[in-house]
Every structure is written in C-alpha cells, then in structure tokens.
Image: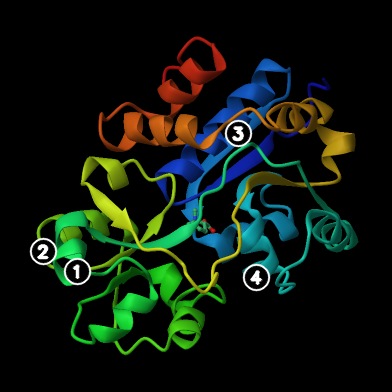
Amino acid sequence: GSAVAAPVVVGSKNFTEGVLLGEIATQAGREAGADVRHQRQLGGTRILWRALQDGSIDAYAEYTGTLADELLQMPGADIAAMQAALARDGLAMTAPLGFDNSYALGMRRAHASELGIRTLSDLRAHPTLRLGLSNEFMSRADGWPGLRNAYALPQSPDGLDHDLAYRALANGAIDATDLYGTDAEIPYHDLVVLRDDRAYFPSYAAVYLYRRDLAQRATALRDALHGLEGRIDAATMQRLNARVKLYRETESAVAADWLGLEAPDS
Ligand code: PBE
C-alpha cells in the first residue's frame, strides 16, 4: 500500500460482541495488508451509523433487523433492498457472517416457571413485574414502545446499562430484561428466553457495513470483511463472548485466537 495513506478505521458499538467483531475485522484487515485502526466502543447504534456516513469510520458490525427497522426505516426489507438503499448513501454491506443476535426478553428460569410465564403474551397478566431494559432498547423503533403496543404490556420499565442488567436480574433487583441472543450470560445465569409469540422482533443477522470508497482506499480490508461471510455461527459467537464477559480475556486476544493469529500486545 501507499506509505502516505491514512489508516482506515473500524468502529465498534459499546458492548462486548461489537468490540469482538471490530477486533476480528481489524486484525483480519491487517493480516490482509491494510493499515487499520480500531476505534472501540464509540457508542450506541446511532453514533456508529452517523460516524460511518460522515466518514469518521470506514466499517463496523451491524445487524440486519437494526438496519431495516431503526436505521433505514424499511421494516421487513430484504438484503437486496437494503443493499440498494445503502448504495445510494455510498455504503455497502457484507453477506451475513453466520449468526443472528436477536433481542428477546428474559427472566430467571425458576422465577418464570413459578409464575407460569413462557411467552411475551404471558407478561400481560403480571403488571407488577419489574422490567429493567437497556437504555437503547427503551427508545428504539424495534424496542420497547413497539413491543408494548404489539403485546399490550402494562409494565413501566426502567432503563439501565445492558452490562449491569444481568447482575440486577441475578440478584433479584429486576424480574425481566432485554437479552441479546448470543450473550454468554443466558446459559450462565440459567435464564429463559420468552417466546416472541406474536413475531414482533425481526431477524438480526450480523453483517459488516462499510463505505464503498474502501475500494479506492483499502481493498484489503473490504476483501477481508467479505472473507468473514458465513464463518461465525451462533454457538461460536456465544463462546467468544463468554471468553471476554465471563472469563476476562481481552477482545484482541480472543479475536486473534479465533483468526489463528499471534495475540497483539494491547
Ligand atoms: N443487539 C441485539 C443488536 C440488536 C439486537 C443489541 C446485538 C444491535 O443493534 O446492536
């Protein structure tokens, strides 16, 4: 590559899986010869989307349902329709990486079975349940306002940080929270995922979004992103999340190990 070119920038959302996917993209891009910097934990979904559009980052990991419902406002759009909409903004996406990370509501298994709650509809009969929902979920198009309407839910949830929600659930401070399907804490805390019996949530296949001008600036990164298509299944992603969240390895070490590379210093 050219010695004068500025590094290309991969961004990531502020949760474990986002950082892991950012590290995987960064290290795969470097391995392919691109000069890549990872700007970690930039913020929530809308911050990353804006950064991609204004060129302060060049790529980040996103989810199809988030893209359709929240970012493009094209609920139900298929991948081809989303590709076309992205292209009009100078953006592109890879094919799915191989797993879905869907929103869901979850409870402690014993508590849910004690109350006879198996589905989201079952929550209607328990108006005093304490819902603690992640801050982003509280205000998203595919989040609480739509969920409340779809199921006529009577609770008034509180917002909290997603990483604190599991502790709050485990120690009984809240009764239910929004889960991300590949979170390592779901099996670890023996949580039950309530069935979405009205099919409210879209599917959230993980993809990378990137700027089309990468074709001029860093083909190696673009090709590396496409090289990750279909390579990560849900069990693998949940295991990688567990290594960081439960067993305290760094995202860079876990990403390097999964890619079969030497662990970087950071
Ligand atoms: N998530 C779960 C997605 C949506 C569902 C938080 C991983 C996200 O948009 O980041």
**x, y percentage for residue 110?**
15, 57
Residue at numbered disc 4:
69
Q: For the residues marked 3 and 2, what is the alpha-carbon distance in whole angstroms?
A: 41 Å
Toward the front, the furthest residue is 116
Q: For the residues marked 4 and 2, what is the alpha-carbon distance in whole angstroms?
A: 32 Å
Q: Which mark is residue 137?
A: none
Residue toward you, 179 or 224: 179
**x, y percentage for residue 78?**
78, 59
Residue at numbered disc 2:
172
For label 1, the crowd category at 10 Å Cα-Cα, with few meaning under 14, some 14 to 19 and many 20 or more, is: some
Q: For the residues marked 3 and 1, what is the alpha-carbon distance in whole angstroms?
A: 40 Å
Q: Which mark is residue 175?
A: 1
Residue at numbered disc 3:
37
At a point 41% along the width and 63% down the height, the residue shown is 195
| Nearer to us: label 3 or label 4 | 4
Q: Which mark sits nearer the N-terminus, 1 or 4? A: 4
